[in-house]
Amino acid sequence: MATAKKEATIEIRPISVKKVAIRIVGDTPLIVHAWSEKAKRQMLEAQQKTTKTKAREIRRPFEDFVNSLYWLTEKPTADTDEELEDKFVEAVNNGAKFGFPVGGIKQSANSAAYRMGWVTNQMALRGSYFLSTEWGEFAEIKGCAPEMREDMVRVGIGGTDLRYRGEFASWYMDLVIEYNENGSMTIEQIINCINAGGFACGIGEWRPEKDGRNGMYHVEEIK
């Protein structure tokens, strides 16, 4: 006589998503450098080898500065830097908002956790938590308006160039952590990773991860 097969029991572990609001506060100035449409076009033209037939465009430092910012509100445009500067001041006075990619903040946290030996690989952290804001993939930079800075940078082998980018001297950002409380990491561990990311890696240009000291931050407030 055949014996009845035993039914397999599958245990579905519940996913319990919790949200915790935090604030990261800058310890050093944040330098941003968004890819402008002009820069993307020039890269594409270089790859298509069409730039040699075109006259070189006149450099507009203030336009470079405006385009280096991640605009959450409408970005002003103008035919000259003088006119653009007036429109920029007007936009700031009318409450212009600027942001920074949330992915860069998470990457700094994950990289710091790996460097400090808290995790064996960064892949394990990617699905452990998520950072979100009301602006989707960007976190709003609060605390001050951006200023234009001029830096000399190395380009290629032995070449130099000037870069005009936005700098936020005194800044902070509000974020929401979404995590599974039944997962492998506690909220304390996640926050410590984010805090360590602000010291060991930073965000933006010339951050500690790139041999600089800009874009450092710490977790100051948990609401």
Image (cartoon, rainbow, N blue to C red):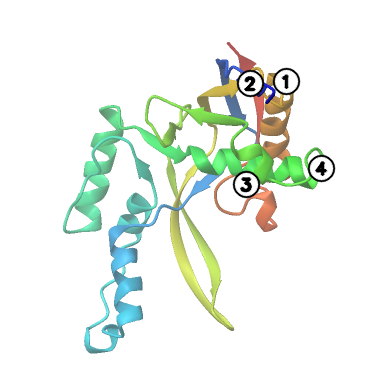
Amino acid at the residue labelled 1: Glu
Give the mark nearest the N terminus, 3 or 2: 2
Q: Earlier in the sequence, mark 1 or mark 3?
A: 1
User: Mark 2 or mark 1: which comes first in sequence?
Assistant: 2
Say the numbered circle drawn on residue 166. none
**Residue sitting nearer the eye, 138 or 90:** 138
Residue at numbered disc 3:
214
- Residue 45: percent from left, percent from top: 29, 77
Residue furthest out toward the top = 223
Q: Identity of the amino acid at label 3?
A: Asn
Query: Given this view, does label 4 or label 3 mark the residue nearer the observer?
Result: 4
Q: Amino acid at mark 4?
A: Met
Residue with the mark numbered 4 = 116
Q: Earlier in the sequence, mark 4 or mark 3?
A: 4
The answer to which image quadrant residue 92 occupies is top left
Comes first in the chain, label 1 or label 4:
4
Where does label 1 land, which residue? 188
* Callouts 2 and 1 close, C-beta under 8 Å: no
From mark 4 to mark 2, how far is it between C-alphas?
46 Å
Instruction: Please provide percent x and percent y for residue 8.
Output: 65, 23
